C-alpha cells in the first residue's frame, strides 16, 4: 500500500510541475485520473490534502516570487481536478441515499401493515403512520416511544409478548406473536406482530424491524365459529336427549292411555262371548259403551299423531294451524293472545310450514314456562322481500347479555330453523320490559314452489 501511495505522490508532483509549465487540458486530465486511482486505492481526502501540501512545498513555494501567485492558482485548479472523482462519488452516494429514502417512504405509506423500527441499545423506536392508525391515532398523536405501544398491550398478554421479545433477542427464536392492544378509543383490537433483529459481532442486537397487522375481524370470526360449534354440539346433545324423552313420552302414552283403553275394550268385548253354550244378548247400552271406547281410542291416536306432526298443516295450511295452536295455548295457560295473521298475504310452501310452526310453538312454550306474562302478541306479516314473525310478551324479561342463555336450547333450535330458511332470529329484552322475538325470513324461500 505504501509503495502505491509513494508512486502516486511522485506522479502527482510530476504532473503538477508539468501543468504549471503548460497549463493544458492534458494536465487536468492527468489530475482527474490520479484522483480516480487514489479513490480506488481507498485513500481519503486527508491523504490527498497531505499529498498536495507536499507538492506545494516542493514546487510552488521555492518558485520565483513573480510567478508564485500564478503557480498557486494553477496548483488549486490541479488539486480541484484531483478531487473531482471524490465529489462525483459523494454526489452519487447522496442521490442514491435520497432515492433509497424515497423508496422507503413510499413502501411505508403504501404498506397494509404497521411498520416499526427499534434500537434495543438506545430504546429509540419508529412507528409508521399506518401503525398508529391501527391503534386509532393520527401520525402526530402517538409519540415514537416504545411505551406508547408496549404499554398499551392487554394485561393478560403483556407477559407473553415480553417473553417472546426477550427470547428473540437472546436466543434468536422467531418473534411471531398475537396479542390485544388498547386503541385510542379505549377498546382493544387484536394484532399479529412479527419482527427480526440484527446482531453485531459481540452478539448484541442493535436493530429490530417488524410489523403489525390488525386481525380483530379474524379473531372475531374465529370466536364466532368456536361459539357456533360449541352451540351445535350442545344442541345436538340436547336434540338427542329430547328424542329419547319424546320416545319415553310416546311409550307412556301408548302404555297408559292406549294400553288401558285397549284392555278395557277387550274386557267389554269378552262379555259378549257366549258362555256355557248359552247365547248372549247384546244390549244397546253395551254396544254404545264399546263404540265410546273406540271413539276414545281414535281420539288418543289423533292426539299422539298431532303432537308428532300437526295434520292441519297439510290439510289447511300454516296460518290455520297456528290459529289452532294459539287457541289451545290461550285456553291451557290462560294467557291472552293478540294475533295479527293474514292468511292470504303469503303463499307458504309445504317445505317451510313445519319449521315456521315449530318456531311459533317453541316461542309460545318459552312464554308459558319462563316469562310470567299475561298477554302475548303474535304477528305474521309480509314486508317485502321478507316475512316477519314476531312474538312479544309483557313478562318480566331478561338481562340483554343473558338473552342467549335464557331457554337457550329452544332459542338455538329456532335459530337453526330460521337459518335453514335463509333468515335470522333477533332478540330484544330487558328486565321488566318483556321479551320480543323476531324472525326475519326471505319470501323467496317461503314461497318457492314445492318440488314434485
Image (tube, helix red, strand yellow):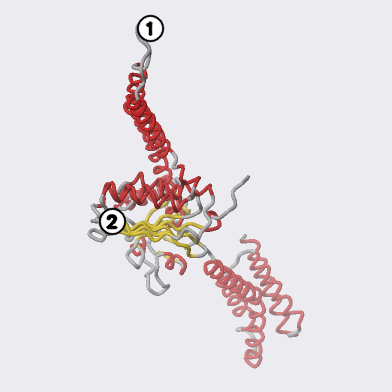
**Residue 19 vertical placement versus 222 (above, below):** below
Residue 328: image location, x then y, percent = 33, 47
Point out which mark residue 351 bears. none
At horizontal 38% and vertical 14% (from top left) the residue drawn is 273
- Tag 1's secondary structure? loop
At horizontal 42% and vertical 72% (from top left) the residue drawn is 139
Category of crowding for the residue at label 2, using alpha-carbon neighbours closer than 10 angstroms: few (below 14), some (14–19), many (at least 20):
some
- Tag 2's secondary structure? strand
**Residue 355 vertical placement versus 87 (above, below):** above
Q: Which residue is mark 1?
A: 277
- In the picture, the quarter occupied by the C terminus is top right
Category of crowding for the residue at label 1, using alpha-carbon neighbours closer than 10 angstroms: few (below 14), some (14–19), many (at least 20):
few
**Residue 221 vertical placement versus 63 (above, below):** above
Residue 150 appears in view: no
Q: Residue furthest top?
A: 276
- Say whether marks 2 and 1 touch (CB < 8 Å): no
Q: Quadrant of residue 216?
A: bottom left
Q: CA distance from mark 2 to mark 1?
A: 62 Å
Amino acid at each position: 500500500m505504501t509503495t502505491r501511495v509513494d508512486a502516486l505522490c511522485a506522479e502527482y508532483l510530476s504532473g503538477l510541475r508539468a501543468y504549471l509549465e503548460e497549463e493544458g487540458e492534458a494536465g487536468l486530465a492527468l489530475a482527474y485520473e490520479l484522483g480516480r486511482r487514489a479513490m480506488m486505492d481507498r485513500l481519503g481526502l486527508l491523504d490527498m490534502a497531505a499529498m498536495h501540501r507536499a507538492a506545494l512545498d516542493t514546487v510552488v513555494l521555492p518558485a520565483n516570487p513573480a510567478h508564485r501567485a500564478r503557480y498557486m492558482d494553477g496548483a488549486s485548479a490541479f488539486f480541484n481536478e484531483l478531487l473531482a472523482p471524490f465529489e462525483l462519488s459523494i454526489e452519487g452516494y447522496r442521490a442514491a441515499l435520497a432515492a433509497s429514502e424515497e423508496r422507503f417512504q413510499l413502501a411505508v405509506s403504501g404498506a397494509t401493515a404497521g411498520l416499526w423500527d427499534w434500537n434495543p441499545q438506545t430504546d429509540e423506536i419508529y412507528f409508521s403512520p399506518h401503525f398508529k392508525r391501527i391503534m386509532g391515532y393520527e401520525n402526530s398523536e402517538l409519540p415514537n416511544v416504545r411505551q406508547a405501544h408496549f404499554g398499551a398491550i392487554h394485561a393478560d398478554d403483556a407477559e407473553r409478548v415480553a417473553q417472546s421479545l426477550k427470547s428473540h433477542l437472546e436466543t434468536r427464536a422467531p418473534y411471531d406473536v398475537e396479542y390485544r392492544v388498547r386503541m385510542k378509543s379505549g377498546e382493544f383490537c387484536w394484532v399479529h406482530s412479527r419482527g427480526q433483529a440484527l446482531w453485531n459481532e459481540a452478539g448484541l442486537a442493535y436493530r429490530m424491524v417488524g410489523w403489525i397487522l390488525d386481525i380483530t375481524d379474524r379473531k372475531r370470526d374465529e370466536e364466532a365459529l368456536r361459539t357456533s360449534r360449541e352451540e351445535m354440539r350442545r344442541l345436538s346433545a340436547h336434540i338427542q336427549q329430547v328424542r329419547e324423552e319424546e320416545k319415553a313420552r310416546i311409550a307412556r302414552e301408548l302404555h297408559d292411555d292406549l294400553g288401558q283403553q285397549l284392555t278395557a275394550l277387550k274386557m267389554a268385548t269378552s262379555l259378549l262371548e257366549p258362555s256355557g253354550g248359552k247365547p248372549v244378548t247384546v244390549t244397546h247400552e253395551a254396544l254404545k259403551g264399546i263404540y265410546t271406547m273406540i271413539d276414545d281410542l281414535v281420539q288418543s291416536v289423533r292426539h299422539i299423531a298431532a303432537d308428532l306432526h300437526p295434520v292441519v298443516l297439510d290439510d289447511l295450511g300454516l296460518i290455520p294451524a297456528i290459529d289452532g295452536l294459539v287457541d289451545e295455548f290461550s285456553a291451557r295457560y290462560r294467557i291472552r293472545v293478540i294475533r295479527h295473521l293474514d292468511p292470504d298475504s303469503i303463499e307458504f310452501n309445504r317445505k317451510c310450514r313445519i319449521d315456521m310452526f315449530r318456531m311459533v310453538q317453541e316461542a309460545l312454550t318459552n312464554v308459558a314456562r319462563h316469562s310470567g306474562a299475561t298477554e302475548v302478541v303474535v304477528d305474521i306479516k309480509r314486508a317485502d322481500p321478507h316475512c316477519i314473525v314476531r312474538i312479544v310478551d309483557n313478562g318480566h324479561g331478561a338481562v340483554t347479555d343473558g338473552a342467549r342463555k335464557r331457554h337457550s336450547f329452544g332459542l338455538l333450535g329456532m335459530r337453526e330453523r330460521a337459518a335453514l330458511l335463509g333468515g335470522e332470529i333477533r332478540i330484544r329484552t330487558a328486565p321488566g320490559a318483556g321479551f320480543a322475538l323476531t324472525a326475519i325470513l326471505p319470501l323467496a324461500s317461503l314461497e318457492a314452489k314445492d318440488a314434485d
